[in-house]
Image (cartoon, rainbow, N blue to C red):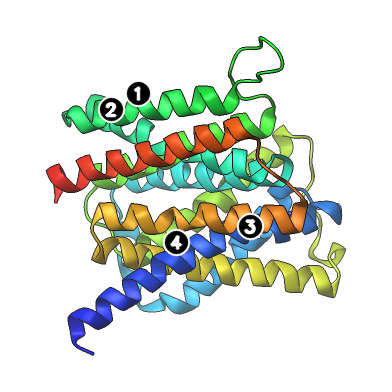
């Protein structure tokens, strides 16, 4: 296998591995929630573990830690909110509705990049915006009543905000000076742990002592942390080696994994309008990625 083929194989593997992780990671978080530990608490502990793993893996990168640009703080907070709100949404919400609301993120990326980075929106971008909005309206509309087609509970609002946070993270990454995979990964993990600490008192929760968890719960959190660490590093590697359109197609595998997992593990099934709206959101994501790959690469 040539060096290029090897890099391509690992990049594709990395993105698919990340998609599988994010498609199933909601389940162990739900198990922790059922054991009495909220998503904020388990996120703090799992991402703190990821930070410790990262400190060992990236030990030789520490010299440049104080030379990070100011945008790194914004990236840290945006990525922190993105991941934390996603975890909270998938614990309480219907997995596929949460995922599809998150996948409106290409729409927000196009809008943010236009107004913040002054990037033009081409015809494909405008088509993607219209299709994703139509898809969201169809998916969110309750056809048994005349209610407005908006997120119907806290989990869905969190999912929507997570997608916006993801778009903000993408735009900040483009706007900031070049950051290594190690720096970006650590910023994500530190951001989530910090955001969890900020949210705990606001939600009237306390951080339980380490002794509050039994051996099974520690094993579960360690499994989540290992998956998070591997997924973050693999995905960062994949994104740097693969074009935007290919990466977007591979990321959509997450929805397949989540659909199968939520059906078998949580007995969740989607209605016809959720399938139709979801298909339009996925189509819009692919169209917006086509704009990115044609005009930015």
Q: Is residue 75 above or below residue 250?
A: above
- Dot 1 or dot 4, earlier in sequence: 1
- Residue depth check, mark 1 versus mark 4: number of the one nearer the observer: 1
- The reply to whether callout 2 and callout 1 are in contact (CB within 8 Å) is yes
- Dot 4 or dot 2, earlier in sequence: 2
Q: Secondary structure at mark 3?
A: helix
Q: Quadrant of residue 97?
A: top right
From mark 4 to mark 3, how far is it between C-alphas? 31 Å
278 or 222, which is in the foreground? Answer: 278
- The reply to whether callout 4 and callout 2 are in contact (CB within 8 Å) is no
The answer to whether any part of residue 254 appears in the image is yes
The residue identified by callout 4 is 186
- Dot 3 or dot 2, earlier in sequence: 2
The residue identified by callout 1 is 130
From mark 2 to mark 1, how far is it between C-alphas? 5 Å
- Are there few (<14), some (14-19), or many (20+) residues within 10 Å of tag 4? many
Q: Position of residue 273 (x, y in %)?
A: 58, 30
Using the image, tell me which numbered label, if any, was put on residue 260: 3
- Are there few (<14), some (14-19), or many (20+) residues within 10 Å of tag 2? some
- The reply to whether callout 4 and callout 3 are in contact (CB within 8 Å) is no
- Dot 4 or dot 3, earlier in sequence: 4
């Amino acid at each position: 296998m040539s060096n290029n083929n090897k890099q391509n194989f690992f990049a594709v593997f990395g993105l698919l591995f990340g998609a599988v992780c994010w498609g199933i990671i909601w389940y162990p978080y739900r198990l922790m929630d059922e054991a009495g530990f909220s998503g904020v608490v388990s996120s703090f502990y799992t991402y703190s573990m990821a930070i410790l793993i990262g400190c060992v893996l990236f030990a030789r990168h520490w010299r440049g830690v104080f030379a990070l640009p100011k945008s790194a703080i914004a990236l840290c907070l945006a990525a922190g909110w993105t991941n934390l709100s996603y975890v909270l949404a998938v614990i309480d919400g219907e997995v596929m509705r949460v995922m599809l609301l998150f996948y409106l993120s290409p729409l927000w990326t196009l809008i943010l990049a236009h107004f913040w980075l002054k990037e033009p929106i081409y015809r494909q971008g405008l088509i993607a915006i219209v299709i994703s909005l139509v898809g969201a309206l169809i998916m969110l509309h309750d056809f048994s009543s005349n209610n407005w087609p908006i997120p119907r509970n806290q989990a869905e609002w969190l999912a929507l905000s997570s997608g916006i946070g993801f778009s903000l993270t993408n735009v900040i990454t483009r706007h900031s000076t070049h950051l290594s995979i190690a720096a970006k990964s650590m910023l994500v993990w530190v951001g989530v742990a910090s955001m969890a600490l900020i949210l705990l008192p606001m939600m009237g929760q306390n951080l339980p002592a380490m002794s509050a968890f039994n051996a099974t719960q520690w094993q579960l959190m360690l499994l989540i942390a290992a998956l998070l660490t591997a997924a973050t590093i693999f995905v960062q590697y994949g994104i740097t080696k693969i074009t935007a359109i290919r990466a977007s197609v591979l990321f959509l595998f997450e929805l397949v994994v989540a659909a199968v997992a939520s059906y078998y593990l949580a007995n969740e099934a989607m209605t016809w309008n959720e399938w139709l709206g979801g298909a339009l959101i996925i189509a819009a994501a692919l169209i917006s990625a086509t704009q990115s790959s044609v005009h930015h690469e």
